[in-house]
Structures are given as structure tokens and as C-alpha cells.
Image: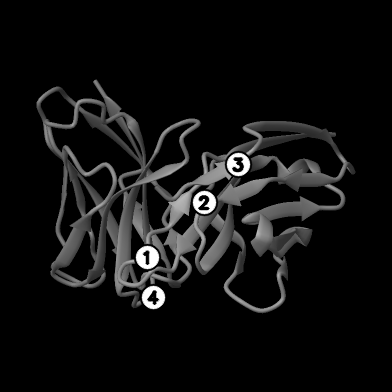
């Protein structure tokens, strides 16, 4: 079955530290890729997405992600985190297989940034 | 002001009771979805609808039912057959099944 794995369930960082959250998926064909963020008390928001083209995509709030097809990965990065980045981050994938294409979520990574 | 609205924000269910969660969108999206979010498990798909008057079961449809009589609305009923209904329920919509999904604020369901 198709699945999405997020390597870290909890990450704790100090402000100004660099962030990298891992995401791997299990599907050999074409995919659409997403990172969503859920800030405390707020609803799920799109952080960035990749459909095609440049595999390095930039999103809101200084986040970026790199699609490496050979590694089935779509890792999220930020060079310098802020306290306001404290949130839960979800990687999600749509395997494009024809017919209905389901959005499959990873289990999420909770990020806590300390001032 | 376009978006997805869900109501109520909190809902309490008694044993043996059916409850209905509302989801409305004014984005003119064809596709709508219901997910359940539990701690440490990400989001799991309950039901989805690609067009009006059509819907399909997702991964965890048992104990739930939906309708899609209007493009803007996709209510979810949690029936008494759902033995573990306590969760955070998220509704989403997208222009089509392959495109970005946009999420509502969610409804937290608690059992009394």
C-alpha cells in the first residue's frame, strides 16, 4: 500500500537553528507533493507544493523543500527557525495513477522552537 | 471572503446518538473530503466526493455517512455504530482530485 513516512515525530530546536524534516513516500510513479502546517489553535494550511519543474520549491515563511525522485523524498528545510514556527508539520502525497488520486498524509512532526 | 467553514467548533455526543458535522465551501470546488485526525496518526480519509450526488468511502468509513446534494455542502454524520468517535474532524475541498486541498478549521467531537 502507498504510504508516507515522516522520520521525526518530535523535534525541539532553539531559535536560529536550522531545520530539516524528512519525508519519504512509497510509490514509483508520478506524484504531487505537499507540506502542510498546523499552528496551535489554527487550521491546516498549505506551506508549499511540488507538481513539476524545478525540484527545489519555496513556500511561505522562508520554508523550502527539495524533491529527490531517486530517493522518493521531499524534505522540508528552513535555514533559521523562529519561535513562531512552533507547529505540527505534515507531508502529503498524491500518487497520480489515474482515476481518483488520494491525498496520503504522513503521521506529522511536532516542532517546538525555544526562544 | 472565500473559504471553508465547519460547524460547530465543538460537539458533544451521547451514547447511541447520531450527530452531524457541517462543512460548507464557497470556493466553487468540485471535490470535497472528510478526514479524521488523531494524535500521532496524521489525517485519515473518511469519505470523499468528486462531484455533486456522488461520494466514495475512504479508508475509515465504517460508522460514518455523508451526502452531497449541493456543490457547496458535504455534511458528515457520525453514527452510533462508530465506537471511537472522539477525534478532530477536518473537511477539505479542491478544484479536482489531483490538486491542492484546502482545509476548514475543524470540529472537535467529544463523547459524554
Secondary element at image label 1: loop
The picture quadrant where one finds residue A7 is top right
Mark 2 / mark 1, whichever is N-terminal: 2
> Which circle, 4 or 1, is nearer the viewer?
1
Q: CA distance from mark 2 to mark 3?
A: 12 Å
- Residue A114 visible? The answer is no
Label 1, on which residue? Answer: A101
Secondary element at image label 2: loop
Name the residue located 51 percent from the left edge and 69 percent from the top edge.
A30
Name the residue located 56 percent from the left edge and 62 percent from the top edge.
A33
> What percent of the width, then of the height, locates residue B42?
47, 40
Mark 2 in CB contact with mark 1 (< 8 angstroms): no
Crowd rating for badge 4 (residues with CA inside 10 Å; few <14, some 14–19, many 20+): some
> What percent of the width, then of the height, locates residue A58?
73, 67
> Which circle, 3 or 4, is nearer the viewer?
3
Which numbered disc covers residue A26?
2
Crowd rating for badge 1 (residues with CA inside 10 Å; few <14, some 14–19, many 20+): some
Mark 4 in CB contact with mark 1 (< 8 angstroms): no
Which numbered disc covers residue A6?
3
Label 4, on which residue? Answer: B95
- Residue A23 visible? The answer is yes
Q: Disc 3 sits on a residue from what chain? A: A
Mark 2 in CB contact with mark 3 (< 8 angstroms): no
Q: CA distance from mark 3 to mark 4?
A: 27 Å
Q: Are marks 2 and 1 on the same chain?
A: yes
Q: CA distance from mark 3 to mark 1?
A: 21 Å
Mark 2 / mark 3, whichever is N-terminal: 3
Amino acid at each position: 500500500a502507498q504510504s508516507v513516512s515522516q522520520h521525526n515525530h518530535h523535534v525541539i530546536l532553539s531559535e536560529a537553528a536550522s531545520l530539516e524534516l524528512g519525508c519519504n513516500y512509497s510509490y514509483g510513479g508520478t506524484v504531487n507533493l505537499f507540506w502542510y502546517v498546523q499552528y496551535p489553535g489554527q487550521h491546516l494550511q498549505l506551506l508549499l507544493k511540488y507538481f513539476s519543474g524545478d525540484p527545489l520549491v519555496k513556500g511561505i515563511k522562508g520554508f523550502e523543500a527539495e524533491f529527490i525522485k531517486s530517493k522518493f523524498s521531499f524534505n522540508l528545510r528552513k535555514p533559521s527557525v523562529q519561535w513562531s514556527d512552533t507547529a505540527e508539520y505534515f507531508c502529503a502525497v498524491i500518487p497520480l495513477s489515474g482515476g481518483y488520486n488520494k491525498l496520503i498524509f504522513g503521521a506529522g512532526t511536532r516542532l517546538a522552537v525555544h526562544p | 471572503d472565500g473559504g471553508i467553514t465547519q460547524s460547530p467548533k465543538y460537539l458533544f455526543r451521547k451514547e447511541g446518538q447520531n450527530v452531524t458535522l457541517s462543512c460548507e465551501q464557497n470556493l466553487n470546488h468540485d471535490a470535497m473530503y472528510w478526514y479524521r485526525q488523531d494524535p500521532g496518526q496524521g489525517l485519515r480519509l473518511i469519505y470523499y466526493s468528486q462531484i455533486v450526488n456522488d461520494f466514495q468511502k475512504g479508508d475509515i468509513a465504517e460508522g460514518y455517512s455523508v451526502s452531497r446534494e449541493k456543490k457547496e455542502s458535504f455534511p458528515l454524520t457520525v453514527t452510533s455504530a462508530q465506537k471511537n468517535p472522539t477525534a478532530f474532524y477536518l473537511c477539505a475541498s479542491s478544484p479536482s482530485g489531483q490538486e491542492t486541498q484546502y482545509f476548514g478549521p475543524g470540529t472537535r467531537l467529544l463523547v459524554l
